[in-house]
Image (spheres, rainbow, N blue to C red):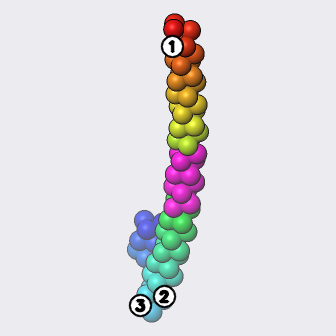
């Protein structure tokens, strides 16, 4: 976008006021684009964090269940050997 603006300035003879207006307009468009893109990226990052939290939570539950099953199996075998 910036390169296009520079080329337009070089090849389109305009008055100083028109050129300043053009630059201001393009700068505003660029700012809007960057702001919108920043919001999109932030939303994507937040979604990724939430997914990661869900995965960690599920793995924690599975590990806890496996640990509990292991404790139960140990207690059962311990009881059999007496």
- Residue 21 numbered tag: 2
| Vertical comparison of 20 with 11: above or below | below
The residue located at (52%, 51%) in the rendering is 49
Residue 44 in magenta? yes
Asked whether disc 3 touches disc 1, contact meaning CB atoms under 8 Å apart, the reply is no
Residue topped by disc 3: 16
Tell me where residue 73 sits by quadrant. Answer: top right
The answer to whether 3 appears left or right of 75 in the picture is left
The residue located at (46%, 78%) in the rendering is 27
The residue located at (51%, 7%) in the rendering is 81
Which one is in front, 36 or 25? 36
Residue topped by disc 1: 78
Percent x, y of residue 63: 53, 31
**SS majority, magenta:** helix
Range of residues picked out in magenta: 42-55
Count neighbours of disc 2 (C-alpha within 10 A) and say few if under 14, some if 14 to 19, many if 20 or more.
few
Q: Is mark 1 on a helix, strand or loop?
A: helix
Comes first in the chain, label 3 or label 1: 3
| Vertical comparison of 60 with 13: above or below | above
Comes first in the chain, label 2 or label 3: 3
| Vertical comparison of 29 with 44: above or below | below
Which one is in front, 6 or 26? 26
**Marks 2/1: CA distance?**
85 Å
Q: What element carries label 3?
A: helix
Q: Examine the rendering and report whether any part of residue 4 can be seen.
A: no
- Of badges 3 and 1, the one in the foreground is 1
Count neighbours of disc 3 (C-alpha within 10 A) and say few if under 14, some if 14 to 19, many if 20 or more.
few
């Amino acid at each position: 976008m910036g390169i296009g603006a520079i080329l337009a300035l070089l090849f389109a003879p305009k008055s100083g006021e028109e050129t300043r207006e053009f630059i201001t307009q393009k700068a505003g468009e660029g700012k809007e684009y960057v702001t919108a893109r920043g919001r999109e990226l932030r939303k994507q990052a937040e979604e990724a964090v939430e997914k990661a939290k869900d995965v960690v939570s599920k793995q924690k539950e599975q590990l806890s269940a496996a640990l509990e099953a292991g404790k139960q199996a140990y207690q059962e075998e311990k009881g059999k050997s007496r």
